[in-house]
């Protein structure tokens, strides 16, 4: 008792908060997902698996849209994030400037997406460039909802990717690259035979972390997408539960989204050696 | 009255025994070193004296008062850490004053004491520096000043020099000794470095696997090792297994024994408790083996002939490996003149073995 | 020093050094991304200054300030309250996790961090249901603070754990051998040395809570809404009016200044392992 005493007491408030405001609500969410519409709030809720059947029969495209957008945005992050992280770690002296400017996406997707509406909108700052490329800046927002949604999501999650890969690359001794080069490896071979194998866990962790965040996309799809992109689960469950008061179906969608996000997180924790990877 | 007394002090961590029934009486003003390889329990012993680790068993007494239950901050000990452990967010003066401000002491007294300490370590102008601005040696000196400022009853040193480079280590170990002599305080010093232990101690406790193998002066430890571990750990030693053939008891209760080992008879004086037929190990240090001419008459514990296997020049000394009846012996020769005695044709050499030490072989504690 | 320094072909220095070109391109690549990060903010600022007549004025800011300063104030209050609660529960928890034996430590840590991995909409819905059905705090300030606390205290916990793990125990031990009690050791030595880690936690909590809108959307009441939710609400009603842009610019500018201040004072060392590391 004396052995576990102080640790338990110190930990108690945190555990209490987590249980009451995180664990219990999630358990309730599961419970509600097994009832019909908003009958959970009545004295005798109608228990049913119908919500999951409905998702299977009618909302599978919504699930796929969510996964498709998250996958595309995460690959976008990976392809552009790796060179960014590499240059940042190995070549750049003004890392603090980069760090400071990279903060803006952290303020959340709301302002970011809101700003992107102006950036891509008619008379936006990119209009000359877009017109030069033959894209009509006045109709861009409506012509490319899929691409713009993916780009918006990717910008928001880009720093997560860079952070993870940069952390992994920092741990790769630069002399290994030099050794490979003196042994006659071409740049591409240095990349595929030294850098990628050694930073692989960080890359995977970064990808999965971005994927987890992108699964929860809400405002980006709402402001940059059209009906197709707005089918993502977060938006749909909000409409079902908060506008149409079908709590059962909304909760079931939440559970599906949750299951997707947790399996991804579980994978990423297994691969990451982040702050908590004790 | 011993200032610090340990009675069968023991520390278990689960099933592993870190410190095994260590007992010691340390006198007022004495400088005692706990010497041993890493993991031998010396640091744990020291931390138990400091109160940072609770003993599983046994008693720790300061001035005949049991202090087992006294928390660290009331034990009035000073502890010097391997990493100086200066508080990085406080100036040198604040660090030194920290111990004083833990008790109710007037500010003027604190300031005077801080200045006194700064002068003691010959850094009078460093009061406002931060620890990060000091060199390694300066940091360790400030740590010593901080430890001495509160006038502790016992000074404890946990390998305070091991993080420093060699030259600094040599100077600082004498500074530590001088500070201890000048203040007349009891000191317990933990190290794995024999030369450090031999240079500054009044008494050395050699520890191994949680136990004290031998306690004694430098000469005791070096010349009269009581266990095979001590013989091997302190300095270099040749271990020669053998059987006792004769024992002659002298008037003073000491024995002279003859051991049959590596095909010769070795005579060892001043032993005790050895019987005929005992299996023993005779230890002879490389520097106590001499190369002698074939016709030279010498007084030695034993004379053997062997075949030179290897010669390594190490500047002032020459290190030979000589095989005697299948046993390789390390031999250190100072000066090259003795090398002329080597027969380059047959590569045989005659060796005189001096100052042997004998340890009874019990069980399998000796290879 | 570039990736394509030729190691086998030794040729005379030519006019266009490929190494220098590649190096320049690398810097350009970084800067293109930095522009992408900051462009939405800058465009928002420009839009907030535009007038329907085609000129520029700060009228929108005056309007936004008059209309929304109570909401900004609510955001500040919610953020401060959350930070204080986070400190009270996360700092002891970090000590427990690093310094004390806790059975099932990994499991406890995962349970504490569950909210960090829960998509915002899912957390919002689960809290909305629980608040309405079980806790009866739907639409209250307390409900919002509770949601923010559970959502962000892992962000306080992580930097403090990192700082505490990196803090050698010898400082505490040294203080105790010098006669300091446990409490004094904690107050004079350990908490000051954890300062940067705790500050990092405060910064992360601030950045997230101050700008949170999604969970808020599910559980906030119709009145007394925090500023970020007001912006979300205005998107549906006032669209992309300059006053909305002005409010968004104010929020981002405030957040940015706080982060800059933090970097100035503490550097970025203790943000390692977090988004800002």
Image (cartoon, coloured by chain):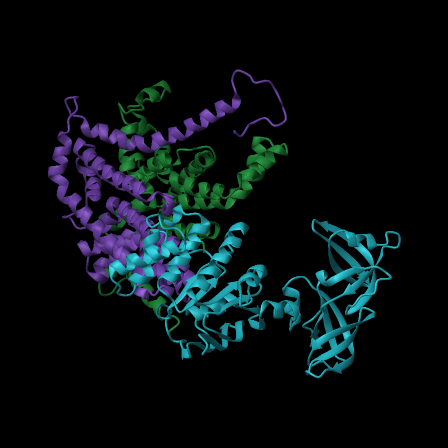
Quadrant of the rendered structure where residue C61 is? top left
Left or right of B203: which side holds A138? Answer: left
> Chain A, which colour?
green
Pick the quarter of the image with the N terminus of chain A: bottom left
Viewer-nearest residue: A167 or B358: B358
Quadrant of the rendered structure where residue A95 is? top left
> Chain B, which colour?
cyan
- Where residue A172 appears, x then y in whole percent? 52, 42
Q: Can residue B224 be seen by looking at this rendering?
A: yes
Q: Is residue C58 above or below residue B175?
A: above
Viewer-nearest residue: B330 or C94: B330
- Where residue C83 appears, x then y in whole percent? 25, 52
- Where residue C59 appears, x then y in whole percent? 13, 30
- Where residue A162 appears, x then y in whole percent? 42, 39
Quadrant of the rendered structure where residue A255 is? bottom left
Viewer-nearest residue: A166 or B21: B21
């Amino acid at each position: 008792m004396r052995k576990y005493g102080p640790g338990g007491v110190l930990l108690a408030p945190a555990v209490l908060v987590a249980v009451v405001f995180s664990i219990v609500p999630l358990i309730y969410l599961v419970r509600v997902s097994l009832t019909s519409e908003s009958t959970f709030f009545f004295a005798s809720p109608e228990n049913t698996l119908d919500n999951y059947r409905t998702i299977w029969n009618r909302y599978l495209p919504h699930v796929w849209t969510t996964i498709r957008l998250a996958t595309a945005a995460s690959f976008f992050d990976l392809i552009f994030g790796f060179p960014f992280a590499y240059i940042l770690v190995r070549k750049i002296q003004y890392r603090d400037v980069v760090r400071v400017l990279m903060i803006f996406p952290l303020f959340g997707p709301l302002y970011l997406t809101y700003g992107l509406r102006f950036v891509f909108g008619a008379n936006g700052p990119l209009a000359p460039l877009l017109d030069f490329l033959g894209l009509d800046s006045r109709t861009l927002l409506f012509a490319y909802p899929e691409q713009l949604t993916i780009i918006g999501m990717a910008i928001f999650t880009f720093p997560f990717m860079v952070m993870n890969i940069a952390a992994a690359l920092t741990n790769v001794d630069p002399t290994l690259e030099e050794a490979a080069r003196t042994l006659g490896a071409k740049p591409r071979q240095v990349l595929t035979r030294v850098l990628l194998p050694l930073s692989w866990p960080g890359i995977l962790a970064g990808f999965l972390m971005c994927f987890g965040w992108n699964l929860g996309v809400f405002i980006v799809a709402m402001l940059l997408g059209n009906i197709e992109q707005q089918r993502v689960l977060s938006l749909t469950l909000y409409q079902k539960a908060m506008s149409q008061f079908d709590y059962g179906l909304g909760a079931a969608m939440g559970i599906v989204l949750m299951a997707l996000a947790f399996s991804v997180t579980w994978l990423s924790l297994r691969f990451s050696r982040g702050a908590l990877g004790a | 009255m011993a200032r610090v007394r340990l009675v069968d002090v023991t520390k278990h961590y689960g099933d592993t025994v870190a410190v095994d029934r260590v007992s010691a009486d340390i006198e007022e003003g004495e400088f005692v070193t706990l010497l041993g390889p890493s993991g031998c329990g010396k640091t744990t012993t020291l931390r138990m004296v400091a109160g940072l680790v609770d003993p599983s068993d046994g008693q720790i007494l300061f001035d005949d008062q049991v202090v087992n239950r006294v928390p660290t901050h009331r034990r009035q000990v000073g502890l010097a850490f391997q990493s100086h452990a200066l508080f990085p967010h406080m100036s040198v003066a604040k660090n030194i004053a920290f111990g004083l401000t833990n008790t109710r002491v007037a500010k003027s007294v604190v300031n005077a004491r801080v200045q006194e300490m700064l002068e003691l370590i010959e850094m009078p102008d460093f009061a406002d520096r931060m620890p990060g601005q000091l060199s390694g040696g300066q940091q360790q000196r400030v740590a010593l000043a901080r430890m001495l400022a509160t006038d502790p009853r016992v000074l404890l040193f946990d390998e305070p020099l091991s993080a420093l480079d060699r030259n600094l280590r040599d100077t600082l170990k004498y500074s530590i000794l001088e500070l201890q002599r000048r203040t007349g305080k009891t000191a317990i010093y933990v190290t794995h470095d024999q030369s450090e232990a031999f240079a500054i101690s009044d008494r050395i406790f050699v520890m191994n696997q949680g136990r004290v193998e031998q306690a004694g002066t430098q000469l005791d430890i070096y010349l009269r090792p009581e266990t095979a571990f001590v013989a091997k750990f302190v300095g270099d030693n040749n271990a020669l297994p053998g059987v006792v053939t004769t024992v002659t008891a002298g008037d003073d209760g000491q024995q002279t024994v003859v051991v049959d080992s590596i095909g010769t008879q070795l005579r060892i004086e001043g032993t005790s408790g050895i019987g005929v037929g005992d299996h023993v190990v005779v230890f002879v240090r490389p520097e106590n083996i001499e190369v002698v001419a074939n016709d030279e008459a010498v007084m030695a514990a034993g004379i053997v002939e062997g075949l030179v296997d290897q010669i390594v020049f190490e500047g002032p000394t020459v290190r030979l490996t000589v095989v005697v009846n299948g046993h390789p012996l390390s031999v250190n020769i100072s000066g090259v003149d003795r090398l002329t005695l080597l027969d380059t044709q047959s590569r045989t050499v005659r060796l005189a073995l001096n100052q042997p030490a004998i340890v009874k072989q019990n069980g399998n504690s000796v290879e | 020093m570039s990736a394509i320094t030729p190691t086998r072909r030794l040729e005379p220095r030519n006019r266009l050094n490929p190494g220098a070109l590649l190096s320049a391109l690398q810097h350009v690549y970084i800067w293109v991304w930095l522009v992408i990060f900051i462009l939405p903010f800058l465009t928002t600022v420009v839009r907030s200054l535009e007038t329907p007549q085609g000129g520029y004025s700060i009228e929108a800011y005056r309007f936004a300030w008059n209309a929304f300063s109570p909401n900004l104030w609510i955001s500040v209050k919610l953020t401060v309250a959350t930070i204080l609660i986070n400190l009270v529960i996360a700092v002891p928890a970090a000590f427990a996790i690093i310094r004390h034996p806790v059975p099932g430590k990994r499991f406890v840590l995962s349970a504490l961090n569950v909210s960090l991995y829960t998509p915002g909409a899912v957390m919002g819905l689960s809290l909305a249901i629980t608040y309405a059905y079980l806790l009866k705090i739907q639409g209250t300030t307390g409900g919002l603070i509770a949601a923010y606390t559970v959502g962000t205290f892992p962000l306080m916990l992580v930097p403090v754990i990192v700082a505490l793990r990196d803090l050698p125990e010898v400082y505490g031990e040294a203080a105790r051998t010098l006669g300091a009690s446990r409490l004094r050791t904690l107050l004079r030595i350990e908490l000051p040395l954890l300062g940067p880690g705790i500050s990092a936690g405060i910064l992360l909590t601030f950045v997230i809570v101050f700008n949170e809108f999604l969970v808020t959307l599910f559980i906030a009441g119709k009145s007394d809404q925090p500023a970020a939710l007001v912006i979300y609400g205005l998107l549906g009603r006032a669209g992309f009016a300059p006053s909305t842009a002005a409010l968004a610019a104010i929020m981002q500018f405030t957040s940015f200044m706080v982060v800059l201040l933090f970097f100035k004072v503490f550097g970025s060392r203790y943000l390692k392992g977090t988004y800002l590391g």
